[in-house]
Image (cartoon, coloured by chain):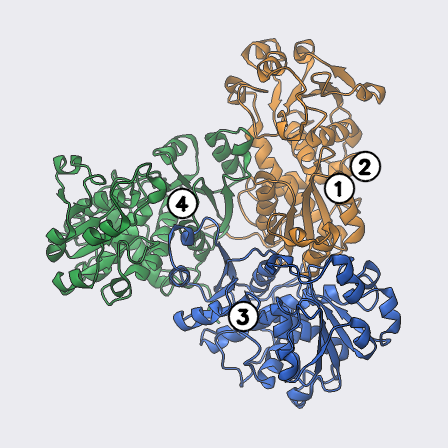
Chain colours: A orange, B blue, C green
Amino acid sequence: METMTEDPPLTFPSIWRHKHLLDLERLRSDELHAILKTAQTLKELTDGCRRKLSLLSGKTCANLFFENSTRTRNSFSLAAKRLGADTVEFSSSGSSVAKGETFVDTAKTIEAMGVDWVVTRHSTPGTPHLLARELKCSVLNAGDGPHEHPTQGLLDILTILQHRGPSNWTSDEVDPSELLAGMTIAMVGDIAHSRTARSNIWGLKALGAKVIICGPPTLVSHRWEEIGFEVAHRLDDIVQHCDVLNLLRIQFERQSTRPFPSVREYAALYAMNGDRMRRAKDNILIMAPGPINRGVEITPEVADGPHSVILEQVTNGIAVRMAALWLLAGANDQL
Amino acid sequence: METMTEDPPLTFPSIWRHKHLLDLERLRSDELHAILKTAQTLKELTDGCRRKLSLLSGKTCANLFFENSTRTRNSFSLAAKRLGADTVEFSSSGSSVAKGETFVDTAKTIEAMGVDWVVTRHSTPGTPHLLARELKCSVLNAGDGPHEHPTQGLLDILTILQHRGPSNWTSDEVDPSELLAGMTIAMVGDIAHSRTARSNIWGLKALGAKVIICGPPTLVSHRWEEIGFEVAHRLDDIVQHCDVLNLLRIQFERQSTRPFPSVREYAALYAMNGDRMRRAKDNILIMAPGPINRGVEITPEVADGPHSVILEQVTNGIAVRMAALWLLAGANDQL
Amino acid sequence: METMTEDPPLTFPSIWRHKHLLDLERLRSDELHAILKTAQTLKELTDGCRRKLSLLSGKTCANLFFENSTRTRNSFSLAAKRLGADTVEFSSSGSSVAKGETFVDTAKTIEAMGVDWVVTRHSTPGTPHLLARELKCSVLNAGDGPHEHPTQGLLDILTILQHRGPSNWTSDEVDPSELLAGMTIAMVGDIAHSRTARSNIWGLKALGAKVIICGPPTLVSHRWEEIGFEVAHRLDDIVQHCDVLNLLRIQFERQSTRPFPSVREYAALYAMNGDRMRRAKDNILIMAPGPINRGVEITPEVADGPHSVILEQVTNGIAVRMAALWLLAGANDQL
């Protein structure tokens, strides 16, 4: 039987000051590096995110989700439990909000129950930032509309670093802003509605990667070019140049009008399939934030093939969430 | 990192005999005092209901809620977890009751899974009393229709004692029936549908307070006068005399007909607002069981003002629920 | 206060090799015996399934239920918690499946979060077998359509053994295939839609019992006779010969057409009532998998009478689920 590691050799990074994790756009490269290194260490200390530590025992993490989610919610819950914390679930249905309470009052009530972190998802961009101003406990953004989903961006970047980062990427010696220098990474698909895309884009850029934004003109604004990113409208134009493809799901639930004629047409232009794999680099990494729609953005032979790291992304999700919870608690003077 | 206090200096009150907590109407003042003192001690031992003890480790608390609730349900869950117990959630939707099982059979089945407490909420008054007769484990009433909500009454009273009680209120020397002597406390609003009102009224009376029941004639029965309470139909008539106002939410979901012409008219007569604050005592306490409807029973300037103790009530909810779980387990010979 | 037993005297049965629990049809009698003995030991070590051990601490059990359930789901959760494991809940509503993800992708995603067991319920027979082929972690079938519900079969058999098994039934000396020799056990009611019936039938047969399958011709196939079971269409024909009656619920939710004229007619022919009790053996055991429908398959005087072991079945459900989790983890080289 495993025993709990009471005192894992984990050093708090001196540069970390944030008590909230709201977006990646405003994090510096050394701050991103600090989270990613901590995530890697915690992954190793927990035997691949499977075993339990007691670093955060006695603390409580509240999930306050106003959009359906089981995957992200459970990933945060498991991350908290892996570090010994308790979890408590709040949802919008059947809750006080239905009785006329404001969102901030709901969150303050949860905080008053003695929680240490509020993890929140909401369809309105900026809600976590609002909560961060109103609460004394730590706030983690688990997705605010199409804006950002910072832990998803971090887990994607962690997966890239594990496969393509310099061998000493966890060292303090590296220049964080050059960690992904020379890498070309494409975000493919429904950029307009994707908080995952936005968190990836800012994080990847800060670490020195070249980011290509690829998708139908209806789903990719040309404003991205104005602020320095490459935009492509055909996957065939870029597939041979990319080190990493991150294949986004079409978020039909966020669209009021159809952004392309049919799913079949979308797949013809943007699905990663066997034919395109043969034109890709030999060591291309295939990523997808999931849930994947087989036959739409990715075919089964690619999803289940040797270049796919989709399930590693899921495991890394536990790692970065453990890291975030631990770092925020530390910055909040709670350790 | 915090460590668990294995042996907190907590003394079981010798007068406590109950294995169920069903209502406040039938508790004596010394019994109320015992719960409140225990709650205060547990709040302090848990650093304001934030840290974890192991007093009840290995035990299991089952939530059996037949009405929507996240606030009270989670408060009980957190209280159980703060003392080291496990929790398990049952709800009416998708459960055995939908397959034709009786309420008592459902509860007995849960008990047979080895739980130590059943916390129950039901729209029918008396259901917790029914369960208490049928089960061997402890039963806690978390609201039975408009009848009682004893832990809500206790947390309100605990909040009053912390602010206005005699400095030695936790001492064994005080006369519990005089703890709130000289205090005038008004329950304002939808008395007819409020289990919170009823639990407060019986508890406050037992501890010596003067209770005023204030609301529209359609929501306040004159039977309250017959049994010795003061009834008022205008907040303006009483606001200057009160030490505490407890502002109830209008429970539209419990009303079959509208008890007043409009929310605007209700607010004009009963909302606690800045104008009425200026006519109130200097040290008036503003309470609300929540969720609050800003602009209906309370305006934002009052809810967020210095006299409001609404969020302290939430924290005290954890404290009284920890106390109740611990006392009932002790009386059930389980400690 | 109870303390956790760190090292309970529990020996892993050398014959146990399975890392999944999918059905009872393909388990040998010595394998059934191994689970049942382990369940009995764990029930005793946990003081009747009430106290907590740490045998599986640090591990995580995921519930992946695609049919409504609170009873079975919570029984598995409690079993996991009683052995120190954490639990995490996934359900179909609001999950990734609604966003187009396949069932297997959902399960693989959950596995990638580092869980040790996936407990699954699905309306399609064979889904747990499918998952077992795709996942590296252990899979437990908590009901696959009308096919099997192996832990329900085991808990029913454990209850029979406790009351009617040989006094040395937990000994290694007994012949498992003769454990229930001489016992006549009838499964009564909706055999066609009952996974409980099927798991009981295979398990009971393997341990040497005589099994009678009793119900309306529309709900009992004559194929059962062809494979060696006795079929009856009137409870009155068999009641005096039975040592155990297992009274199944009519699963209206699984039926597309009415299999009998009315509930009243069904009850007249198949309900176990006081009159039939008087014609039964003196020591007959009355069982029901629950939730029971009083007045349909069983009358209150029988359900609440001295021969009923319905609530013991519930407690034994925790015991067999603890045993299954522990044995599968051991076979999966995780202990």
> Can the viewer see residue C183 in this picture?
no
Q: Is residue C334 left or right of residue B245?
A: left
For label 2, count other residues whose C-alpha is less than 10 Å away and answer few (under 14), some (14-19) or many (20+): few
Chain of the residue under label 2: A
Residue at mark 4 = C329
Residue at mark 3 = B325
Give me the disc on residue B122. none
Q: Is residue A314 left or right of residue C46?
A: right
Look at label 3 and name its amino acid: Leu
* Discs 2, 4 touching: Cβ within 8 Å: no
Element under disc 3: helix
How many numbered callouts?
A: 4
- Label 2 and label 4: CA atoms lie apart by 44 Å
- Label 4 and label 3: CA atoms lie apart by 34 Å
- Label 2 and label 1: CA atoms lie apart by 9 Å
Look at label 1 and name its amino acid: Leu
Q: Give whichever of C267, A6 is nearer the camera.
A: C267
Element under disc 1: loop
Q: Which residue is at a point 65% across and 85% down the rendered structure image?
A: B228
Q: Position of residue B88 (x, y in %)?
A: 49, 57
For label 4, count other residues whose C-alpha is less than 10 Å away and answer few (under 14), some (14-19) or many (20+): many
- Label 2 and label 3: CA atoms lie apart by 45 Å
Give me the disc on residue A26. 2
Look at label 2 and name its amino acid: Arg
Chain of the residue under label 4: C
Chain of the residue under label 1: A
For label 1, count other residues whose C-alpha is less than 10 Å away and answer few (under 14), some (14-19) or many (20+): many
Residue at mark 1 = A22
Element under disc 4: helix
* Discs 2, 3 touching: Cβ within 8 Å: no
